[in-house]
Each structure stands twice: as structure tokens, then as C-alpha cells.
Image (cartoon, grey):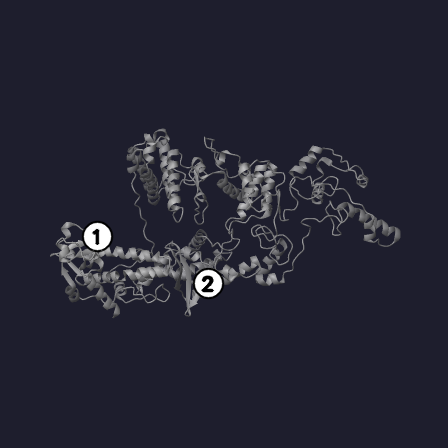
């Protein structure tokens, strides 16, 4: 199996592209940039011990041994720490008591004290040959004189040996210390390997050539075998802070150099690349003699090489392919547009769409959206791709010529596609298209459901409509009848239900919660996150993405600070129970302990604002990345499977809390504020009580103000006592007489009714002649929602307060209109009326109106009361 392939090179055309030029030339130019650290340009990349990304120092202070791969300590200290942690020792205590260790061997041997060009071998500072001579002479002197000879006396009579040059083993950068021109480590390995080729110095007195300053002639039984061993042998020591690229071909060497630099300067929480694993990649490229990483056979590589090489190729794809090249190659890179969706890569593959015209339409539509208004996630693009992959597979099988000629398509082909999708959804058959790069007889096909069918229709329809609106359909000859035949998918799934009482008790049972911790062996906070979801009703990611500093006390009340990113509300606070406050405090202590274990110090105040409360285990160097929703949902689902309850999901906790709020007296405005919703309509989606429930009526008629944890404490959230029928009739105005329609109501100023110009510059909403009828109630509800959404999206609280203040008189008038309509029994009719028809003009809902200023004044008096 070869490495993850870069897509084929684009054929050279009139205009040269980056993929049709010399890739080595491109990488050489990038590496020559002044922003590239010079160490990444070397054949042997020497990494400092404390490098921010590739650092390899043990986490125990002053320990000189190298870091074990994907560990916080060297091998010896890591084994000790695991044993002591099981005994209950804290990491701070371990680091305080752990003794630093010296390395077992030199990373870079110093020069011999006699031969400046030959590396030392022993702790006495002598090279291998001088150390052997010193040992022999000392033994001879002891036998002859019965005493020890002075080292300095012997040292004065010694002469230096000539340099032997660099070690003949291709990836080795160490100096040789013997006539075979091998470094000491590889000389030892050569003997253990059985001395392939039988290379040796001539006779036992070969040192006489060195004494005369002449090179030692080497005798071989099979020199080709010796040379082969030198080429194929890897490094003896990969834990020395180096990555040797010696022996690699120029292009693959430049690829590794540039990707190492790019990875080190990428996101702070990119995956870790231990230097030993990088050396495995370099060794595999050298042994297989590949020209580029795309030629590498990963099955012949050491473990972990495939993961690193796959990511390297993703980096290189952004260099080798320009934005224009990707269209011809059949994919799109969001990084080319400066967009990276959370939790996903940059690559967006379109090769599953076989028709070039359809694939180009998808590429153009996605590129236009990325340029003008990128969505919050890539789900929108996944829907487009799904629809077009399914349409492509159908055309390939049923349309003339496989659907590759758009001019040959008709409305009948689209009708057949629609019928095929409906039949598959009805009978649960597999999809025609492979929506993932799956293996096996079905590839990546999945069963068609009503939901996926609707997504298929909507995705394909959006692309085809884009072609129609942009003029591409006319240019390529795609018939309009083929496009407009595709309907809109209108399948809607049911709402999530709140937890039944028995399920709620099971999910809150202490024994069951203790069992939940068994599904989190690394103690990343599974139970803490679940309890926070239940007690706060937050969205799942609003809890999982919490930062370390997410709680505090305000006026002695425990507060929970979080970001409502879905609706654009950041740094929001709600009040939480003391129990949850203490649990989060305990989780903070565990996270800080992990930080100390990794960095040997507590986090700074600035770091505490960025560190994740629930840090994930992998690809998290600085502990800034939180656990994923997939991790949480998978473990939560496994836990639910152990309980004797019906299937439930975590999001039902939000529905449960909303319903319980309403049952206990809160109104929809209160629920909307607490849950962080755009509108009351969305809040209704989470409320599961019938409108006839008397408790709901009591809650809606109660006086409520925002609590201390809301953005505006004390703000009135609902009306007070209802208006009497006598009060409403006193305000009513019969519009069957002289009036004229205006925006959101009617004008009763007779000169204007008679056709004269308005003397108030059409400022209807501030005019005392402007009246509002029940027919306008839905219109004003929409206006109120528009203003609420504007205020919620305001850049700061000052702007939001200003917008609330501007709309406040109108809001009072709307509340007064609702009370007046309710008093005369027309509120339900008004809520059901949403279209002005001429025959309705004389109906009672239309003809009964109220002066806007009087309605607002009445509501203001109620508020004051």
C-alpha cells in the first residue's frame, strides 16, 4: 500500500501551473524564505531540547535523558511515575522528589583529548584507539613496575591519529573512529550483524600505518555486501534530538524539511511528531529510494509513519496545487480561501462525482460560498456533495452516455431520479452513490431514508439552481426543464422529548453516575460534563468547550460563564447550583494538575483563560483543545446501553429543563433568555406542555422579571393583569368609517384619508392618529423579533441597550394590543390572520382598532403598577 496519493498532475496547458512545474523548485524557494528556521534547511536537523514543538527534554527538572515518544518524561521516569501514581502520589510531589538522571551515552561525543578530529569513546576523553592503547600500556606498566602509571605522563608521549571522516552508514552524521570508517555505535552493530562482507584491517599490527600517518588498507571478502550493509543500516540512536535526512533523494528531503517547518508553525494544538517517528519516515524513504512521499509504501514502514506521512501530504497538497489546479484535479481546499471549519481538515473531495460538468458546478458553488459568506460548518457543503454524488451515480447508470453530456438530459431523467430515491427510501435500499471512501462490496453507500432523501434533493437542487442563476446552465447546455423538475426535500423529524420521570431518576441515580465514570478511564470529565448539561440545560458543545476559568461568584452567587457560539452570545453567565459549582472546582484542580505534570509549573492567569476545562488526550500540546462531541456521545451512548431505560440522547436534557422551567412559572421569554435562543418561537420548540395546561396559563399571566444572572436584571419579561372588556371597548375605534391603510396599521387623520399629503412626513408610528388593529398583530410580532435579533447580534451591550430603548414604546403598544384583543375575544383570530384580503376588510378583527399611543400608555400604567 502506498502513501495517501496526491491527485494526478494536471496536464500542461498554455498557462503553466504549480503542478506542472518542478516541485523541488517550489519547495526550495519556500525553504529559502527568511521566515524559515535555518535548522530545517540542513541535511541533519538538530532540534533544541526545549523547542516549542519538537522539544525532547524530560519533564523532570534537570533530567538530561531524552523524552519517550508521546510521554511527559524519559522512559525511566515515566515507568516510576506510573507506578507512583497508582499509589496515590501527586504529580507535584513526584516532580519535587524525582532525581534527575544523566544520559547513558553521549548524544554528540566530544573530540578526543589527543585527536581533535576523532570522537571520544570513553569518559576519560580518549578515542577508541587511544583508550585501547592506554588500557594495554597501564596493564603492562603495572606488571613491570608494580605501580600505577600517571595518565598525564603517558598522555604527553602520544601523537594524534588522522581523521577517519564521516561514518559510512548513509544516515549517520557521526564521525568515524576506526579504519573501517564507522562510528563507534555502528562498529559495534557491524560486529553484532556478523561482519557482512568481512571488512577488516590487515593483521594485528595495522596501527603501524596510523603511526606513520598513512591510511590503513582495508581487506574485504565481499565489498559489495559491506557497501549494501552501510546503505541499508539505520541509525543506532534515534533519541538524540536529531532527524537525519542523509541519503535521501532531493525532492523527498525537501518535502520532509518543509512539512516539519510548516507543522511546527501551524496551530498550537497540532498532532505531535516525535523525532524518533520522523526518523522512521526518513529511513523508510531512504531504504525504498523514493523520489517523493507519494511513492512511499507504508506497509513496509515502521509504526506511526503512515499517520505522519498522511498529514505531510495534506500540507504538500496546498503547495503543489493552486486554487485553479484543484478544480481540474477534482477537489477543493478551504485553506485556499482562508477558511478552516472547526474540527475538520481543509480537503474537500469531489472525485465521487463522475460527470465533469456536475463536479465543476459543485466546485464553483462551494468556491462562491467560501468567498462571499462561509457557513459555520462544512455540513452545508456535505449536503451539496451528497445530493450531487447520488445524482451522478444515477445518471451514470441510467442516462445516455452516463450523463456526461448535459445537453442530452431531459425532465424525464430527473423524474426517474426522483422516483428511484423515493423507492429506495420506502424500502430501505442502499444508495447508488458511495458517499464515503469506504471499502467492501457496497463501498461507502448507506441506506436511503426519508431524511437522507430530503438532504439529497435539497443538496442537488441548490447546485442546479446555482447553475441556473449564474448562467452556467445555459453555457453548458443543461436544460432548464431538467433543473426545475427536482423538488425541495420537505422531511422534518420529530422534536426531542423531555426525559420521562423514570428515565430522569435513572440518569440522576448516584450509582449509575458512578458507573458513568468507568466509561472515562482517562478521567477527562465525562460525568462532570453530563451533570453540567442536566443542571444548566446548555447545548452540548457549550459545556464541552468550556475554558478553565468558567465559574466564579457574583454577589456571593455561584455563576457559570460560557459562550453561546451558535447564536453569537459570548461570555454569558447563568446562576448554577452550589453542587455543580463544587464539582467544576474539582475538575479545575484535575486539569491544573495535568498542566503541571506536562510543564512542571502551574498555569499563568493568561493561560487559565485559554486552557480547556475538559482537555482531550491526543493532539493537545498546550491543552487548549477540548474533548470532542463524538467522544462524549459515544461514551454516553455506551453508558445508556448499560441502563434498563429507553434510548435517549444528551440533548433531551435541554428539552427537559425548558419544560420544567415553564411548569414552575417561567414564561417563554424567560425560557428564551435562559436557554440562549434567537426567538420565542425557538423556545416553544423546547417546551412540551399543551396550551390548555392550567399551569401554563398561570405562568403566562404571572409577573416575571429577569434574574440576577441575566444580561438585564429586573427587565420586565411579561405583562401584568389582563385588560378588562370595558377598558378595551373604551379604547376601540370603528374603522368601517373613514381611514386609510398605513405600514402596520391605519391612519385616521382625515386630511390624509381624503388624499392630502401627510403633514407629519409619514412618521406614522409616532403619530397619535395612527391606530393598530388585530390584523396587524402578526406583523408587529415579526417586527419585535427582528429588533430582538438585531439587539442579540449587537457588537456590544451599549448598542443592544440602545436598540431595546428605541423599540420600547412600540413593544408596549404591542403588549397593549394583545391585552385589548384578548379582552374583546379576538386574540386567537388575530394570531391566525396573516394575509390582508379585500373581503376581510370589513371583518371584526379588521374593523376593531385602537390608538397606538393609548395602547402604549395603558401598558405603561400597568408596568408602573
Q: In the current view of this chain or complex, which residue is farthest to the top?
A: 401
Residue 795 locus on image (x, y percent): 37, 57
The residue carrying mark 1 is 834
Query: Looking at the rendered structure, which numbered label has been put on residue 814?
Result: none
Q: Residues within 10 Å of mark 2 (few under 14, many from 20)?
A: many
In this view of the protein, which residue sits in the foreground, 324 or 497? 324
Local SS, label 2: helix
Q: Is residue 753 visible?
A: yes
Q: Residue at x 71, y 35 (%)?
A: 197
Q: Is residue 300 visible?
A: no
Asked whether disc 1 touches disc 2, contact meaning CB atoms under 8 Å apart, the reply is no
In this view of the protein, which residue sits in the foreground, 636 or 577? 577
Q: Residues within 10 Å of mark 1 (few under 14, many from 20)?
A: few
In this view of the protein, which residue sits in the foreground, 538 or 317? 317
Residue 111 locus on image (x, y percent): 73, 48
In this view of the protein, which residue sits in the foreground, 156 or 834? 156
Q: Is residue 213 left or right of residue 80?
A: right
Label count reads 2
Corner quadrant of residue 100: bottom right
Query: Looking at the rendered structure, which numbered label has been put on residue 584?
Result: 2
Local SS, label 1: loop
Residue 681 locus on image (x, y percent): 29, 56
Corner quadrant of residue 731: bottom left
Q: Earlier in the sequence, mark 1 or mark 2?
A: 2
Residue 707 locus on image (x, y percent): 35, 66
What is the CA distance from the residue labelled 1 to the residue labelled 2? 49 Å
Q: Residue at x 31, y 59 (%)?
A: 803
* Quarter of the image with the C terminus in it: bottom left
Name the front one of labels 1 and 2: 1
Amino acid at each position: 500500500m502506498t502513501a495517501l496519493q496526491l491527485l494526478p498532475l494536471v496536464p500542461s496547458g498554455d498557462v503553466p501551473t504549480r503542478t506542472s512545474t518542478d516541485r523541488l523548485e517550489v519547495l526550495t524557494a519556500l525553504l529559502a524564505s527568511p521566515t524559515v528556521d535555518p535548522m530545517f534547511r540542513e541535511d541533519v536537523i538538530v532540534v533544541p531540547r526545549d523547542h516549542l514543538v519538537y522539544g525532547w527534554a524530560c519533564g523532570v527538572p534537570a533530567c538530561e535523558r531524552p523524552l519517550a515518544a508521546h510521554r511527559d518524561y524519559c522512559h525511566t521516569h515515566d515507568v516510576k511515575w506510573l507506578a507512583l501514581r497508582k499509589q496515590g502520589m501527586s504529580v507535584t510531589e513526584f516532580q519535587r522528589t524525582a532525581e534527575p538522571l544523566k544520559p547513558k551515552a553521549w548524544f554528540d561525543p566530544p573530540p578526543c583529548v589527543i585527536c581533535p578530529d576523532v570522537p571520544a569513546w570513553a569518559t576519560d576523553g580518549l578515542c577508541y584507539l587511544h583508550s585501547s592503547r592506554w588500557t594495554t600500556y597501564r596493564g603492562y606498566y603495572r606488571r613491570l613496575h608494580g605501580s600505577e602509571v600517571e595518565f598525564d605522563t603517558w598522555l604527553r608521549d602520544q601523537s594524534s591519529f588522522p581523521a577517519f571522516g564521516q561514518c559510512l552508514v548513509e544516515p549517520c552524521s557521526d564521525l568515524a573512529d576506526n579504519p573501517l570508517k564507522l562510528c563507534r555505535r555502528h562498529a559495534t552493530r557491524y560486529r553484532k550483524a556478523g561482519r557482512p562482507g568481512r571488512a577488516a584491517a590487515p593483521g594485528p599490527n595495522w596501527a603501524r600505518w596510523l603511526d606513520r600517518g598513512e591510511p590503513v588498507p582495508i581487506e574485504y571478502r565481499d565489498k559489495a555486501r559491506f557497501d549494501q550493509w552501510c546503505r541499508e543500516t539505520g541509525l543506532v540512536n534515534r533519541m538524540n534530538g536529531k532527524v537525519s535526512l542523509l541519503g535521501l533523494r532531493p525532492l523527498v528531503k525537501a518535502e520532509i524539511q518543509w512539512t516539519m517547518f510548516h507543522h511546527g508553525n501551524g496551530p498550537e494544538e497540532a498532532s505531535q511528531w516525535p523525532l524518533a517517528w520522523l526518523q522512521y519516515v526518513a529511513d523508510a524513504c531512504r531504504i525504498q529510494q523514493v523520489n517523493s512521499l507519494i511513492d512511499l509504501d507504508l506497509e513496509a514502514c515502521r509504526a506511526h509513519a503512515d499517520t505522519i506521512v498522511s498529514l505531510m501530504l495534506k500540507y504538500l497538497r496546498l503547495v503543489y496545487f493552486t486554487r485553479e489546479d484543484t478544480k481540474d484535479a477534482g477537489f477543493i481546499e478551504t485553506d485556499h480561501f482562508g477558511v478552516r471549519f472547526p474540527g475538520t481538515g481543509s480537503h474537500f473531495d469531489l472525485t465521487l462525482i463522475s460527470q465533469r460538468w456536475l463536479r465543476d458546478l459543485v466546485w464553483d458553488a462551494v468556491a462562491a460560498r467560501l468567498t462571499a459568506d462561509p457557513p459555520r460548518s462544512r455540513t452545508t457543503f456535505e449536503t451539496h456533495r451528497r445530493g450531487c454524488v447520488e445524482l451522478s451515480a444515477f445518471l451514470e447508470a441510467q442516462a445516455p452516455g452516463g450523463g456526461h453530456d448535459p445537453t442530452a438530459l431531459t425532465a424525464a431523467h430527473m423524474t426517474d431520479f426522483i422516483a428511484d430515491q423515493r423507492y429506495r427510501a420506502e424500502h430501505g435500499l442502499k444508495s447508488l452513490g458511495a458517499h464515503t471512501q469506504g471499502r467492501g462490496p457496497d463501498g461507502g453507500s448507506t441506506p436511503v431514508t426519508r431524511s437522507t432523501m430530503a438532504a439529497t434533493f435539497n443538496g442537488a437542487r441548490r447546485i442546479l439552481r446555482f447553475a441556473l442563476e449564474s448562467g452556467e446552465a445555459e453555457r453548458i447546455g443543461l436544460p432548464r426543464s431538467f433543473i426545475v423538475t427536482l423538488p425541495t426535500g420537505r422531511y422534518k423529524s420529530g422534536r426531542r422529548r423531555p426525559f420521562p420521570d423514570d428515565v430522569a431518576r435513572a440518569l440522576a441515580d448516584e450509582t449509575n453516575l458512578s458507573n458513568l465514570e468507568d466509561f472515562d478511564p482517562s478521567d477527562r470529565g465525562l460525568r462532570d460534563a453530563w451533570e453540567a448539561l442536566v443542571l444548566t440545560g446548555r447545548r452540548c458543545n457549550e459545556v464541552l468547550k468550556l475554558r478553565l476559568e468558567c465559574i466564579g461568584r457574583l454577589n456571593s452567587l455561584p455563576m457559570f460563564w460560557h459562550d453561546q457560539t451558535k447564536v453569537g452570545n459570548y461570555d454569558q453567565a447563568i446562576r448554577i447550583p452550589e453542587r455543580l459549582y463544587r464539582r467544576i472546582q474539582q475538575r479545575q484542580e484535575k486539569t491544573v494538575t495535568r498542566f503541571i505534570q506536562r510543564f512542571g509549573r502551574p498555569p499563568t492567569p493568561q493561560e487559565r483563560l485559554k486552557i480547556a476545562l475538559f482537555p482531550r488526550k491526543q493532539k493537545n500540546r498546550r491543552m487548549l483543545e477540548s474533548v470532542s462531541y463524538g467522544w462524549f456521545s459515544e461514551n454516553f451512548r455506551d453508558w445508556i446501553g448499560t441502563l434498563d431505560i429507553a434510548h435517549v440522547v444528551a440533548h433531551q436534557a435541554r428539552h427537559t429543563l425548558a419544560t420544567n422551567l415553564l411548569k414552575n412559572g417561567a414564561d417563554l421569554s424567560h425560557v428564551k433568555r435562559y436557554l440562549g435562543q434567537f426567538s420565542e418561537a425557538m423556545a416553544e420548540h423546547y417546551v412540551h406542555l399543551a396550551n390548555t395546561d392550567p399551569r401554563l396559563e398561570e405562568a403566562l399571566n404571572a409577573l416575571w422579571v429577569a434574574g440576577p444572572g441575566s444580561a438585564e436584571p429586573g427587565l420586565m419579561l411579561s405583562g401584568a393583569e389582563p385588560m378588562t372588556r370595558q377598558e378595551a371597548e373604551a379604547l376601540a375605534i370603528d374603522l368601517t368609517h373613514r381611514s386609510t391603510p398605513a405600514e402596520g396599521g391605519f391612519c385616521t387623520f382625515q386630511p390624509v384619508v381624503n388624499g392630502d399629503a401627510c403633514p407629519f412626513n409619514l412618521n406614522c408610528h409616532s403619530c397619535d392618529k395612527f391606530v393598530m388593529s388585530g390584523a396587524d398583530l402578526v406583523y408587529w410580532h415579526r417586527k419585535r423579533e427582528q429588533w430582538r435579533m438585531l439587539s442579540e447580534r449587537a457588537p456590544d451591550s451599549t448598542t443592544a441597550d440602545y436598540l431595546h430603548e428605541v423599540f420600547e414604546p412600540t413593544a408596549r403598544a404591542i403588549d397593549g394590543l394583545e391585552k385589548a384583543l384578548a379582552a374583546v375575544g379576538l386574540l386567537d383570530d388575530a394570531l391566525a390572520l396573516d394575509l390582508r384580503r379585500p373581503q376581510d376588510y370589513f371583518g371584526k378583527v379588521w374593523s376593531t382598532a385602537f390608538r397606538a399611543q393609548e395602547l402604549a400608555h395603558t401598558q405603561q400604567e400597568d408596568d408602573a403598577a
